[in-house]
Structures are given as C-alpha cells and as structure tokens.
Amino acid sequence: MTTDEAPDEQSTLTPEAAFSVLGDETRLTILQVLGEADDPLAFSELFDRVAYDDAPNFNYHLKKLVGHFVDKTENGYRLRQAGNRVVEAVLSGAVTEAPSLDRTAIDSACQHCGAPSVEVEYREEQVGIYCTECAGQYGGTGDADEPDRPENTERIGYVHLPPAGVHGRTPAEMTEAAVIWTVAQTQALHRGVCPRCSAPVEESVDICETHEPADGRCDECDRRFAAVVHSACTNCPFELGGSAIGYLHTEPALLSFLFGHGLDPFGGASLSTLEAASVEEELLGTDPLELEFTFSIGDDTLALTVDEELTVVGTGTGTTAADEHR
Ligand SMILES: [Zn+2]
Ligand SMILES: [Zn+2]
Ligand SMILES: [Zn+2]
C-alpha cells in the first residue's frame, strides 16, 4: 500500500493542473491500460501494453500521472480512485460513432393519457420520450436556447443517458435504463449529494403561479405541472431539472404506497410504475409555497402536501368514490 514517490501534497491537484496532466494521449492510454489490468503492472509490462517506443519519454508521461491518478506500489503501477474516475468517464462515452435512434414506438402506455402511444428516440446523449396522442408533459418553449434539442417538440421528457447505455439494448430497454438511472440520480440529488462527484447540491423550485393546464399543458409555462425542480452541483458541471414528482421518490409514504401495490419505483419496472401510478398536482398556495400531489393506483389514492423545499408536510390516503363495482 505504500508508495515511494507519491507524497500527499501531490495528491491534490487544482482543476487546471488536472486538465493539463490529462491533456496528452499517451497519459490517457496509460490510464486506459491500467483500467483494463486486473493487477498492478510492472513498468516493463505497462510500457509493452501501451505500445510506446521511447522509454525515457514514456517514463516522463507516467511520472506526471503518479501521485494523483496512479499509484506506484511495490507490485507495480495501478490506478488511484481519481484515475478510475477518468477511465469511467471516458468509457461511459467511448464509442466509435455516436449512437442515435430515430423515433421508434415502444410497447408502453403514456403516463398521462394512458394510450399505448409512446415513442422514443436517442440523440445528443438524451432519450426523448414522446406521446403521439396527448400534449405530453413539456412543450417546446425555450428549446431554441438549447442547442442539443430539436425545436418546439412536445414531449413527455428528455432523459440523459451516456452512449454506453444505448449499446446492446433494445429501444425499450434503453428507455428503461435511462429511467432507472435518473431515479437513482434523483435520489442522491434530493438528499443534497451530487451523483457525479458527491459535492453538495443546490436545489430550486420554479413555480408557474397562474398555472392552468387546460389541454394538458398550461399556456403560460407550456408545462403540464406547475412545479419544476432544478438541481445544480456546487462543484462540478452536473445539473438536472425536471418534475417535482420525481423528487418525491425519496418519500417513505410514497414508496410504501408504490411497493404496497407491487410497484418498484427503483427497479426495472420504473417506466411501467410511472404508467400505473397516475398523479395530479394542485397548487394550494404560493406564499409560502404549498403543493399537493395525489397519486392514484386503481381506486387507492395517496396525497402528499409539500412545502417550498419539497418536504412533505402532510399526507392523506383514501379511495376514490367510484362505482361499487368496476
Ligand atoms: Zn399521452
Ligand atoms: Zn403554467
Ligand atoms: Zn458534482
């Protein structure tokens, strides 16, 4: 576990120094080779695997990495955590060509209108989820400012997924992976932890105060729901925005409601969970903010009242007064 030339002060790099160290193809190849190795590699073995032809120059590059990204142990060189994270980041997007998928129907019902009319596409590292039968969840207002997005496209949502998540999956599996991944990230975000770098996260809730979703979306905000949440890491570029409903997946009352009806909000059934549990939002007050979300599964309902930090301040359960038999 000891290193002979990695004093602690070398382990902390400014972002500028870290980018500078990594701005070299040979060094990235060294990290990649060490990432693929099962055990630490001796200098000669590492040199051979990187297939470099100038040992002194190779040694120079290797020394730049030792300390922060690479450990030199008595058994050889191996990646430190920072090195692992570089390799992970590269591999999540490492593809010979950027994958894309034109709109394709998947066997899934729209969570808003219930029609079996969901289509998905993949472009610019995002899964677009659309309904061909209803107004979806978001309109296209403001898309012109987002260079990665097709203009003015109404959709259920856009969900980020690295290229590595697309390969080897059907369109339905890709969509499910994107939803599972987003739910997992939202869990950490809403608890104040960045899912990329673990630093604290700042969260803000944007409310449309005159919200009237007459035909599914409101004329004012062009959204189905009045509340949207934006989370941004205080350290790295990671940010995520979306419906407040996704953030309620940390609530024990909602989790037990879903699990109690055989729905796993974290598992492979995430997408069908969204279909099965319909949700309505009601703006109870704006100053201070108070929102009520009512989840329905069959005749059972769960109402959660939340404040401006999306903390649940009230819960209620019930059954809809439907016909005696359905
Ligand atoms: Zn729909
Ligand atoms: Zn609105
Ligand atoms: Zn971060």
Image (cartoon, rainbow, N blue to C red):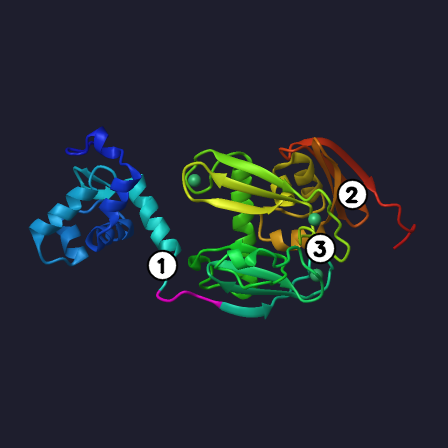
Residue 150 percent location from the top left of the image: 54, 64
Residue 122 vs residue 14, the one in the foreground: 14
| First of labels 3, 1 by sequence position | 1
Q: Nearer the viewer, residue 283 or 96?
A: 283
Label 3 environment density (alpha carbons within 10 Å; few <14, some 14–19, many ≥20): many
Nearer the N terminus, badge 2 or badge 1? 1
Where residue 113 sits, quadrant-wise, is bottom right
Q: Position of residue 144 (x, y in %)?
A: 54, 59
* CA separation in Å, label 3 and label 1: 38 Å
The stretch of residues the image draws in magenta is 96-100
Q: Is residue 190 above or below residue 143?
A: above
Label 3 beta carbon within 8 A of ligand 2: yes
Tell me, for residue 83, which label it has, or none.
none
Q: Quadrant of the N terminus?
A: top left
- Please report contact status of discs 2 and 3: CB closer than 8 Å, yes or no: no
Q: Amino acid at mark 2?
A: Thr
Q: Type of residue at label 1?
A: Ala
Q: CA distance from mark 2 to mark 3?
A: 23 Å
**Residue 75 in which image quadrant:** top left
Which circle marks residue 217 in the picture?
3
How far across and how far down the image is residue 116, in percent?
70, 65
Q: Residue at coordinates 21% horizontally, 33% vertically from top-left?
A: 10
Circle 3 SS class = loop
Verify CB contact (< 8 Å) between mark 3 and mark 1: no
Q: Position of residue 300 (x, y in %)?
A: 79, 44
Residue at position x 65%, y 32% in the image = 311
Residue at numbered disc 1:
94
Q: Is mark 2 within 8 Å of ligand 1?
A: no
The residue labelled by disc 2 is 301
Q: Is residue 303 above or below residue 146?
A: above
Amino acid at pointer 3: Arg
